[in-house]
Amino acid sequence: MTTLRHYNYIILSLLLIALGFLLSSCGQQSVKTTSPDDAASNVVAGSSADVSSSDREAYRDGITALYNGELSTAERTFRGFIKQYPNLAGAYSNLALIALKQEKYDEAMKLVEKALSLNPAQAQAYNLRAQLNVQSGKIHEAKADYLKAVELKPDYVNAQYNLALLYDIYLQDIPLALKHYNIYMSLLKQPDESVKEWINHLKGSLNNA
């Protein structure tokens, strides 16, 4: 029975990793903020530039293109913003996200570092850099970045999830994983049933330890 339970745990862990990469993609999209409206309102974050209302609309269109997977359109938009507003941290973060989606990891890291140099308080950039650190196996650096992201923005849903996943899969710290899974669940408008089931499984594994 112990062997079977261990085998089932491995299978569930692999399934969670697959789910994690899917949600990590969502988490990285949060680098551009949680919605097109939020992104437009934060367009001048980390910059003293006076962005016109028409440019804000163009920025929102770039966000929409990014959400829709139209990466070439989104990239043209944000590169145009950088030329006009070179201190716009959000544009660099969005370009970093695009580079990550294209698996250009070195480029993505350079862009996200630029975003953080312009705006060290951008939670989304820390969330993105953490995921880049996971890609390169720098797990403890990733943990520090996720912790910074949720420190700056405690209601950052995707960062809370990603931090829980890191504690769960990579660091094997189940109590802290449960803590952040529960925070993640508390922030959702609709419950995530797959994560709810996984939480129950983790609680059971602790009770049986």
Image (cartoon, rainbow, N blue to C red):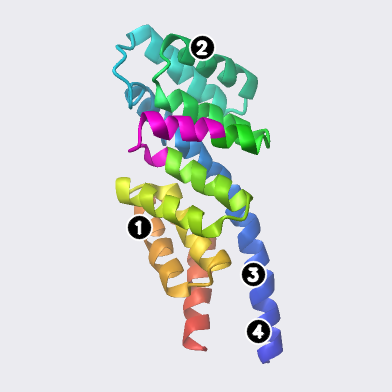
Q: Which circle's residue, 2 or 1, is located before the other in the chain?
A: 2
What residue is shown with label 2?
80
**Cα–Cα gap, marks 4 and 3:** 10 Å
Q: Which circle's residue, 1 or 3, is located before the other in the chain?
A: 3
Q: Residue furthest bottom?
A: 1
Q: Which span of residues is magenta-colored?
A: 110-124
Residue 186 tag number: 1
Q: Residue at x 56, y 49 (%)?
A: 133
Q: Nearer the viewer, mark 2 or mark 4?
A: 2
Q: Nearer the viewer, mark 2 or mark 1?
A: 2
Q: Neighbour class for label 1 at 10 Å: few (<14), some, many (≥20)?
A: few
Q: Is residue 76 left or right of residue 84?
A: right
SS assignment at label 4: helix
Q: Residue at x 60, y 17 (%)?
A: 73
Q: Neighbour class for label 2 at 10 Å: few (<14), some, many (≥20)?
A: some
What residue is shown with label 3?
12
Nearest the eye: 24 or 107? 107
